[in-house]
Amino acid sequence: MYRIVIPVDDDETRATAAARFVTALGDESGLDADLGDVSVSIVNVFKEFQAIDDGGNVRSKDLYDETEFPESAVVVRDRLEEAGVAAELVRRHGDPADEIVDYAESIDADVVVVSGRDRSPVGKAVFGSVTQDVILKSQRPVTIV
């Protein structure tokens, strides 16, 4: 079984770009891989925070719901499953890059597939902060699509 981790946030366009990359692995123009031998964990991280104002103290762990996924995660899962790829939704709480890297390690993922943000030609040389942190912290291969 080839294990892939796809981190997603609320951006459906980026999330579906990662799903397209994975399903293209089964195309003759791709690797012509057997998608039945691929499993994907779609990871959404609820970023840890704490806010203090006149009304009191609000912590992210008080708002975190492990069953609440953004629509982008559900769309990606459905597209992957339609293509014959086993897919699961995973919700984590904490620092996004740390949680993504830790999760990929915990399941012995073969690769992390991250969809980059649209950037100017100069900006394409620099990744977003979460993507950059995943690249730098992960001992696993990271593919940017």
Image: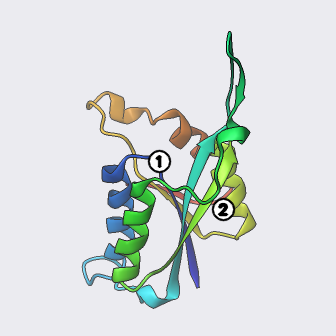
Q: Which residue is mark 1?
A: 9
Return the residue nearer the eye: 43 or 105: 43
Residue 93 horizontal/vertical position (percent): 68, 47
Query: In this figure, which residue is indicated by the disc labeled 2?
Result: 104
Please name the amino acid that badge 2 sits on: Ala
User: In the image, what residue type sits under mark 1?
Assistant: Asp
Query: Would residue 58 be visible to someone looking at this image?
Result: yes
Question: Is disc 1 placed on a helix, strand or loop?
Answer: loop
Q: Residue at x 42, y 85 (%)?
A: 35
Q: Is residue 136 visible?
A: no
Task: Name the element at disc 2.
Answer: helix
Task: Give the side of residue 95 with respect to residue 76, left or right.
Answer: right
- What is the basis of the colouring in this image? rainbow
- In this rendering, position of residue 82 left or right of residue 107: left
Front residue of 58/121: it is 58
- Indicate the quadrant where residue 104 lies: bottom right
Q: Name the residue: 40% across, 56% down.
A: 71
In the displayed structure, would residue 75 be above or below residue 34? above
Tag 1–tag 2 contact (CB < 8 Å):
no
Left or right: 122, with 92 as reference point: left
Locate the N terminus by quadrant.
bottom right
